[in-house]
Amino acid sequence: MLYNSIKESPNYPKGFTNRLNGKTQHNIHNKALLEMLRVVAPGKWKKIYQDGFDVSGLPISIHYFQSASGKVFNVKVKQGWSN
């Protein structure tokens, strides 16, 4: 599902706080994945890893795809940090 921001996603963890310098953006090199994302919304896409803490203070990472328009797709939360 496509959302205007990660905070609109039902997967966005309640009480999430960002880790300082914990966000990275990566170009997508997988052409099949990029074509699939462009069906969802045309244009450039990035893979985002955003590290922080959940409401209990445990380290988590939010993974998602973000279009050039700022819309996000496929928001997932992983335990631990990715950066």
Image (tube, rainbow, N blue to C red):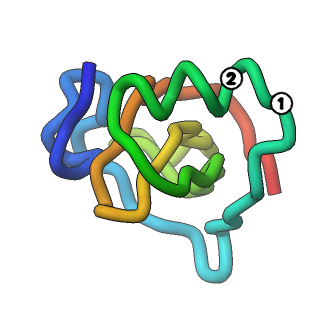
Instruction: Say few, some or many: other residues with alpha carbon within 10 Å of mark 2 (under 14 / 14 to 19 / 20 or more).
Output: few
Amino acid at circle 1: Asn
Q: Nearer the viewer, residue 15 or 76?
A: 76
The disc label shown at residue 73, or none:
none
Q: Residue at x 47, y 66 (%)?
A: 18
Residue carrying label 2: 33
Q: Residue at x 65, y 32 (%)?
A: 34
Q: Quadrant of residue 72?
A: top left
Determine whether the residue tagged by mark 2 lies in a helix, strand or loop: helix
Q: Nearer the viewer, residue 60 or 72?
A: 72
Q: Residue at x 39, y 61 (%)?
A: 17
Rendered-image quadrant of the C terminus: bottom right
In the displayed structure image, the side of residue 11 where residue 77 appears, left or right = right
Residue 1: % across, % down: 26, 18
Q: How many angstroms separate mark 1 from mark 2 (CA)?
A: 5 Å
Determine whether the residue tagged by mark 1 lies in a helix, strand or loop: loop
Residue carrying label 1: 30
Total labels: the figure holds 2
Whether residues under marks 1 and 2 lie with C-beta atoms below 8 angstroms apart, the answer is yes
Q: Nearer the viewer, residue 65 or 31?
A: 31
In the displayed structure image, the side of residue 26 where residue 45 appears, left or right = left
